[in-house]
Amino acid sequence: MANPSLAEYLAQSQRGMYQSVFGPDYLQKGVFTVDTDTNIFDTTYGRKVWQALNNQTRFFNAIPRVVWGNTAGWRVRSDRGSQRSRPVTEVGSLPSVDVSQIETISSLPRIVSTTFGASVKSVFTAQMEGGIGDVLAMENEHAQLDHIKEINEEILAGGLYRVNAAAGDAFTADFKPAAAKHFKIGDTIKLYDDGSNAWRDTATVASVSAAGELSIRPVGGSEVWSGGVSAAAGDVVAIQSRAGFTSIDDVVAELGVRVGASGNNAAYTDGTDGQLAYNLTNRTVGLWNAAGTVLDNDGVGRDLSLNLLDTCIQKVRENGGEPKLILMGHDQYFKLERLLNSQQRYMGQEEYQVGIGSERTFPGTRTGLVLATYMGIPIMPDADVPKSVDSSDNVLGSNIYVLDTDYLEMAIAQPTQYVENRDYFAANQLIVRGLLYTMGEMRCKNIWVQAKITDLNS
């Protein structure tokens, strides 16, 4: 018997198929359409759109979230008063009357928004054969992920970066892409001119390209940097204030920290030079609003050591706090595991996890071979943790933060709102637009009990 033709084979193989409980269109739809160019069956894609992007928002989930409340900030007691407490003899005089030193921290809400849209034609055609289905629902779903990811990136943005290459004009600075994501449109910055060892005018970020180029415009006055200089390789750009949420790197910062430059060239020297966003006053080492400790290495990369981590924990405790979270990138997570591996005492392999907010640590064992805690402090790796830059403009490893989260919070003034607009006349286009926005801010009520380690190798 001769072999059956393809048509005969398909007819025989499907005999009785369309009388199944699945109905006549279950397997019939689209299966036998022939592509006239290749003479093979058409490729049929599913409607589900899978993510090829990192949407993790671990640090955002780990911070306590609170209602904003009726406040624009708070006061901090930073001094006990001089000689108000001392021993008194039986006939001795009383201590001098003095008052506490009260400082103020202002905190106002910031707004983060995410938009999406689709033309009426794409909404219709997406429902047809081979389409992706409800295109608005798909874009809405992904916009929600993008919105929270944006907040996570903002609260983990770095504040000091070196210009990577000579700029095209006086208003442009080129950065490596790894650094550029830490700058947002509307941020105000200061440029440190390495050639003249001087800080230049405050400027506003007008745009950020995917390749890492910032378009910046001096604020107030002429469209030139003071001294007529252009941003060049070796210069440093420092965040002065942020348009979006405050970063943990702004909180755990102080003057005198250097980034990839010799001597004090790129160091903060006073409260007007590249001042960081959180609490705009002079944050010299040891003052009430400086971090518990900032362990930098003058822009020179070095390997993580347990001594560095122990020093941060010690300083936080000496300043009256108790570390609740160790935050780092995945690169430092594995370095820490290797450091502890050689010191293990195998006393059991019980796996456990630690909850932090709505997040949990990676599964660990009590021997620490796969880390969950260090000295009882949960370890949280996050891919968005900022990285340092060395004196040759090379991107180093991620920073490590030792945080007392009792004094950190995500204060929400308005929870995430969704607005949809189908007013074609207002848009002057046949387009459906969507908007997500959140109003809030990351707040720190005690800067003195937070610490970080920078200039680490990856």
Image (cartoon, rainbow, N blue to C red):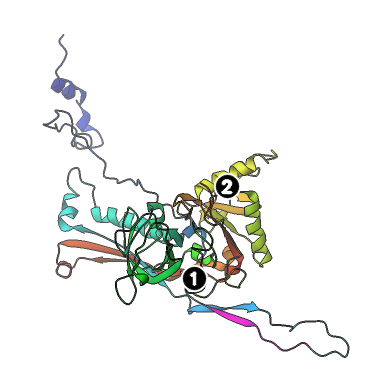
Q: Position of residue 92 (x, y in %)?
A: 85, 89
The residue lying toward the viewer, choosing from 109 and 219, is: 219
Judge from the rendering whether residue 29 lies leftward or rightward of residue 307; answer left or right: left
Where the N terminus falls, by quadrant?
top left
359 left or right of 43? Answer: right
Specify the segment rendered in magenta: 95-104
Query: Quick check: can you spot residue 240?
Result: no
Q: Extreme top residue here?
A: 1
> Do the CB atoms of the residues marked 2 and 1 lie less than 8 Å apart?
no
In the rendered structure, find residue 303 and report the number of the disc placed on it.
2
Q: Residue at x 29, y 71 (%)?
A: 223
Image spot of residue 397 (x, y percent): 50, 49
Does the stretch in magenta take in 411? no
Residue identified by numbered label 1: 278
Q: Position of residue 410 (x, y in %)?
A: 48, 66
Mark 2 closeness class: few <14, some 14–19, many ≥20 residues within 10 Å? few
- Please tell me whether mark 2 or mark 1 is closer to you in this view: 2
**Precedes in sequence: disc 2 or disc 1:** 1
